[in-house]
Amino acid sequence: MPLHRGREKANGHHRSMNPFYGEANPVVEMNEAPPKHRLPDRPMLPTTAYQLVHDELMLDGNSRLNLATFVTTWMEPEAGQLMAECRDKNMIDKDEYPRTAELERRCVCMLADLWNAPDPQSAIGCSTTGSSEACMLAGLALKRRWATRNADRYPSKEARPNLVMGVNVQVCWEKFCNFWEVEARQVPMAGDRFHLDPAAAVELCDENTIGVIGILGSTFDGSYEPIADLCAALDQLQERTGLDIPVHVDGASGGMIAPFLDEDLVWDFRLPRVASINASGHKYGLVYPGVGWALWRDQEALPEELVFRVNYLGGDMPTFALNFSRPGAQVVAQYYTFLRLGREGYRAVQETSRKVARGLADRIGELGDFRLLTRGDQLPVFAFTTTPDVTAYDVFDVSRRLREYGWLVPAYTFPANREDLSVLRVVCRNGFSTDLADLFLEDLTRLLPELRQQPHPLTRDKAAATSFHH
């Protein structure tokens, strides 16, 4: 049974088909359109199959105008060519594709150097399908380290592992806690604080805490969590109680922003308490979807028993991943991008994104209808809501109307303790230029007179109206 079901009509079992797509006889082709929900009885021409799929996908949104996603929506043609050349290579077959494996190793070393690991050349890390898998691996390492230290009392009813995090974490952390039977202890939002507070996090820690998650770039508003302050608070906890609790930094987005734009910000392996870091290569790493990275401070941070050594196709191969088979294309594209841009190139790209975000945020704030929560000066992301005197419409109306112009802007309600706050969020990525920002502002400004004339907000169910999925 599929998890997601589309709308089905009584006669909707076959896909309608343009007669010109047929090979010879248009009438026959019209009468023998392929079924939608079962395999066709016979093959069809590749051009016909392509056109059927292509036409349906035209109804998707334009990814370049999607201001909801953090995921890269543009790469150079050369990167696309490399990916096409490598999409048939299975990353796991390191004996068969040794150069692809070597490029992965180099990427790990480059990231370890970027994140100030003690010894970048011998760094422990791996590529993943994205930050969600990387977070799962980091969480598993935290749990296994805790279980080993508490082998005398775990498992038992009195020793249930817990993980401390802000309520603003990406949903993958809630999944981790659910899948691997770890109690999620979440620091709620309070007032104008929309992410984790170090003191509040420490209060939730005890002898069963496997780690604390710090987010370098919250998806809710684009703000950095105070990783250094968090580590300092945990240092003080250790002095008082002896509890030595590691920190994992979820740098899904900020891990590829802060090293270039906020070099003085201490958040990475320079902090001895930071045991591991993850990032999304397919976000501000500037690669198409399908690649993430997980790195550990040293071998002690990643228990050896979690690393499988597989005799696969005649070779001994260490692996730590949830997925076994996946294409090497994205890893190759990451290495290409590292080579192509270097530090100065990345700095220029990310600085441009932040400049666009800050400029657009300022101009939206000047419209008078909106209040900015953040201004794009950390992640190139900002969130805003309507001012208290705006009663004719809400953020969900704005999101819905912007779709008429092709813009995909998420509107969503904040979690517990700030459920009264509903916002819009704009993610500025490479490819969202100043010109596109100008067009976006023009369309938003054009909508306001009509929105102001509404008798009241048209959103009946905010839960159903939300378009925020991290």
Image (tube, helix red, strand yellow):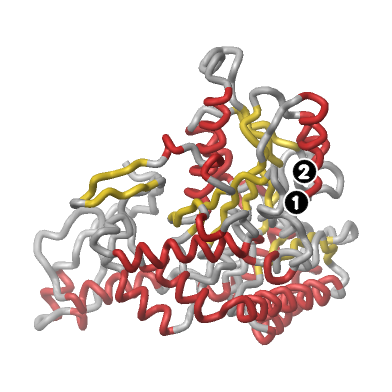
- Give the labeled residue for mark 1: 225
Total labels drawn: 2
Q: Quadrant of the N terminus?
A: top left
Is 128 situated left or right of 466 in this image? left
Image point 15% across, 69% down: which residue? 31
Distance in Å between CA atoms under marks 1 and 2: 9 Å
Rendered position, 299 above or below 446: above
Could one spot residue 82 in this view of the protein?
yes
Q: Label 2 near label 1: C-beta < 8 Å?
A: yes
Q: Position of residue 411 (x, y in %)?
A: 67, 58
Image point 18% across, 75% down: which residue? 46
Is 334 situated left or right of 256 in this image? left
Quarter where residue 407 is shown: bottom right
Which amino acid type corresponds to the residue marked 1 in the rendered image? Glu
Quarter where residue 11 is shown: bottom left
* Dot 2 crowding, Cα within 10 Å, few <14, some 14–19, many 20+: many
* Dot 1 crowding, Cα within 10 Å, few <14, some 14–19, many 20+: many
Rendered position, 74 above or below 124: below
Q: Position of residue 133 (x, y in %)?
A: 47, 48
Q: What is the secondary structure assignment of the residue under circle 2?
A: helix
Q: Nearer the viewer, residue 138 or 372?
A: 138
Is 79 situated left or right of 404 in this image? left
Q: Position of residue 360 (x, y in %)?
A: 76, 76
Image point 41% across, 67% down: which residue? 103
Q: What is the secondary structure assignment of the residue under circle 1?
A: loop
The residue furthest bottom is 435
Which of the marked residues, 1 or 2, is nearer the chain's N terminus? 1
- Give the labeled residue for mark 2: 230
Which amino acid type corresponds to the residue marked 2 in the rendered image? Leu
Q: Nearer the viewer, mark 1 or mark 2?
A: 2
Of the numbered discs in the image, which one, if any, rests on residue 376? none
Q: Position of residue 223 (x, y in %)?
A: 75, 57
